């Protein structure tokens, strides 16, 4: 009698366990990849789904966008500058079947691929491009990753380069380069100003050379300007023919 009750209790427990394992609830952003005796059967969800115990197994797949930090990578630019670059990757699963069947671990695979792609793409550009053309580089990396991960059922939505770090020696070198560039521009602007001033003076001399009265007026203006100076001693040349030209 006792053995029969014990056996019956065990059967009930097993039945409850099997019944419980048959029912699974998948959230709106989840899908279940179902395998029947080891072979792919179908993708189910969301909502309540039924799994045949022993015969079927289910793997949950999250369809939400994954935000993944790409670890800092040592990159040598095309102009042989060593920099450290890190980035952030946004992607999501669009085909649960491929994400489970085509690759062992799609998260790890995507992470490794993003690291190698980051080094490869940035290594083809100069440092100035990394600093000034970041949006274009982001788009190039995103296009390459999206194309390569499509076979895994993954859509790469966006890639953002976060930091491009230089060592102290390179930072000082760039500062010197920027200072030299500013000095060069200042000299160019000064030279252009001198050239324009010389051109204007030449034009003025040409005009005044044919007008004696204009020369006399300019000379008197110069005397007025000198008289307004606070210096106690003033020495200036006086052309001999100036007084001859002045009409009293």
Image: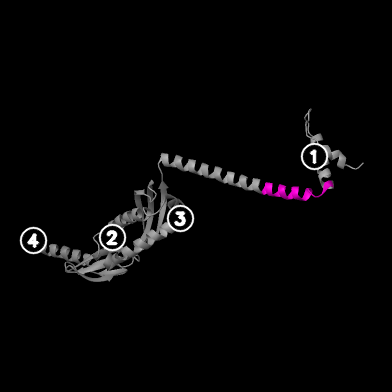
Judged from the image, the secondary structure of the residue bearing numbered disc 1 is helix
The tag earlier along the polypeptide, 2 or 3, is 2
Q: Residue 140 at what x, y percent from top left?
A: 39, 60
Residue that label 2 marks: 106
Q: Residue 20 at what x, y percent from top left?
A: 22, 65
Magenta-drawn segment? 196-212
Question: Do residues under tags 4 and 3 come within 8 Å of each other at their CB atoms?
Answer: no
Q: Residue 100 at what x, y percent from top left?
A: 25, 64
Q: Residue at position x 27%, y 70% from top?
A: 43
For the residues marked 2 and 3, what is the alpha-carbon distance in whole angstroms? 30 Å
Q: Residue furthest top?
A: 232
Residue that label 3 marks: 133
Disc on res. 33: none
Disc on res. 222: 1
Viewer-nearest of discs 2 and 3: 3
Viewer-nearest of discs 2 and 1: 1
């Amino acid at each position: 009698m006792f053995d029969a009750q014990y056996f019956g209790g065990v059967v009930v427990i097993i039945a409850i366990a099997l019944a419980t394992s048959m029912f699974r609830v998948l959230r709106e952003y989840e899908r279940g990849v179902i395998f029947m005796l080891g072979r792919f059967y179908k993708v189910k969800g969301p909502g309540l789904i039924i799994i045949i115990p022993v015969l079927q197994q289910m793997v949950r797949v999250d369809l939400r966008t994954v935000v993944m930090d790409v670890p800092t990578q040592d990159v040598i630019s095309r102009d042989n500058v060593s920099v450290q670059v890190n980035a952030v990757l946004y992607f999501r699963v669009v085909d649960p079947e491929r994400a489970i069947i085509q690759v062992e671990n799609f998260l790890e695979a995507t992470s490794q691929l993003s690291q190698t792609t980051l080094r490869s793409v940035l290594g083809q550009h100069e440092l100035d491009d990394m600093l000034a053309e970041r949006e274009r580089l982001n788009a190039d990396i995103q296009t390459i990753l999206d194309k390569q991960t499509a076979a895994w059922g993954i859509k790469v939505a966006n890639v953002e380069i976060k930091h491009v770090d230089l060592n102290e020696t390179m930072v000082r070198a760039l500062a010197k380069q920027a200072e030299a560039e500013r000095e060069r521009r200042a000299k160019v602007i000064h030279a252009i100003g001198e050239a324009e001033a010389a051109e204007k003076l030449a034009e003025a001399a040409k005009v005044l050379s044919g007008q004696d009265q204009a020369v006399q007026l300019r000379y008197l203006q110069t005397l007025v300007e000198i008289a307004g100076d606070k210096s106690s001693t003033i020495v200036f040349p006086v052309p001999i023919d100036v007084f001859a030209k002045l009409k009293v």
